[in-house]
Image (cartoon, rainbow, N blue to C red):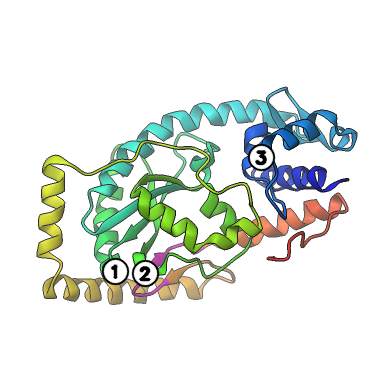
Amino acid sequence: MNDIEEAILRTVLYADVFSFPMTRREIHHFLIADAPVSFESVERTLAASTLLAHALITDGVCFACAGREALFAQRQTRDDVSAGLWREALTHGRWLARIPFVRMVGLTGALAVRNAAHERDDVDYMLVTRDQRVWIARAFAILLVRLARRRGVTLCPNYVLSMSVLAQNKRDLFIAHEVAQMVPLHGLELYHTMRAANAWSADYLPNASGAFYVEPEQTVGGVWRVLKAALEWLLGGALGSRLEQWEYQRKQRRFAAEMAQKAYHAAQIDDKRVKGHFDDHGHPVLRQYAERLRQHNLNELPLAGD
């Protein structure tokens, strides 16, 4: 295989871990390669490569690994499910943006690539807050989670971090994908700052310089802007600092007990970030991806940044 053929195969194999057939545009955007590749080169290679014709199958729109024909119908089902959840994600993203001290809201997880498995699937978000108000903002977000649950919607703002720690500590393909597939809903300027702080992700996904799905930015205006400003004024001083410390210490004890029970976890709990991933999804994903690479005689460490 030449470099582009190998990059395409690697990309589809990674998506196969999530049972996700990819369109030509998705393959190009999330291409796992050493350097940027044009869409025309990807499209031309998909059409002409006899090696990829043996390794991949297509329904004319999407590409999947050979022997995975059932995924094409599943992709359509998940597209339909995701369309309904997408509307909920935008609605609740607007409410999250109204929370005091929240400066950015990003849609993450399976829904961000429209691969939600069922109508009750989680709607995952990343929230970026003002410094020293991570835990207060999270407390407001949890209140919204409980209200949404009464409507049958499962919101998961499971990653809340302050503006001072935008760079990800862990750097691998899984985290690069999580960063690249995020859909910014609020705080577009801060989103671009976060992408710049994680420029290392281009070592894995050089074509994914921006979001694949683009939504109009949700701004906070009218009475909600006034109310948000008023609450930030009220909780911006000594009272807010005491509440922030109390909530942090209270949750830290609880989360520490949960983390101690896990062999692998991706949780990060401190005064600047709340990453409540008590099950480390990245570890099994990368393990399954490595197995697929071995089956196709591909190097498990394709990039220098790995």
Q: Is the magenta stretch mostly helix, strand or loop?
A: loop
Classify mark 2: helix, strand or loop. helix
| Image position, residue 185 (x, y; %) | 37, 43
From the viewer's perspective, tell me whether residue 99 is left or right of residue 258: left
Marker disc for residue 77:
none
Examine the image and state in which quarter residue 8 appears: top right
Estimate how packed mark 3 is, as few (under 14), some (14 to 19) or many (20 or more) residues with alpha carbons within 10 Å: many
Find the distance from the CA under tag 2 to the CA under tag 3. 32 Å
Q: Is residue 286 above or below residue 28?
A: below
Name the quadrant of the N terminus.
Answer: top right
Mark 2 is on which residue type?
Answer: Ser
**Residue 275 highlighted magenta (yes or no):** yes
Looking at the image, which is closer to me, 75 or 40? Answer: 40
Q: Residue at x 49, y 30 (%)?
A: 81
User: Quick one: label 2 or label 3, which is nearer the N terminus?
Assistant: 3
Name the quadrant of the C terminus.
Answer: bottom right
Looking at the image, which is closer to me, 247 or 149? Answer: 247
Classify mark 3: helix, strand or loop. helix
Q: Marks 2 and 1: in contact by CB < 8 Å?
A: yes
Q: Which residue is drawn at 73% across and 37% down?
A: 42
| Image position, residue 224 (x, y; %) | 15, 45
Examine the image and state in which quarter residue 152 appears: top left
What residue is pinned by disc 1?
131
Marker disc for residue 164:
2
Mark 1 is on which residue type?
Answer: Asp
Q: In this view, does 57 lie above or below 205?
A: above
Residue 114 visible in image: yes
Q: Marks 3 and 2: in contact by CB < 8 Å?
A: no
From the viewer's perspective, tell me whether residue 28 is left or right of residue 50: left
Find the distance from the CA under tag 1 to the CA under tag 2. 7 Å
What residue is pinned by disc 3?
28
Residue interval drawn in magenta: 269-278
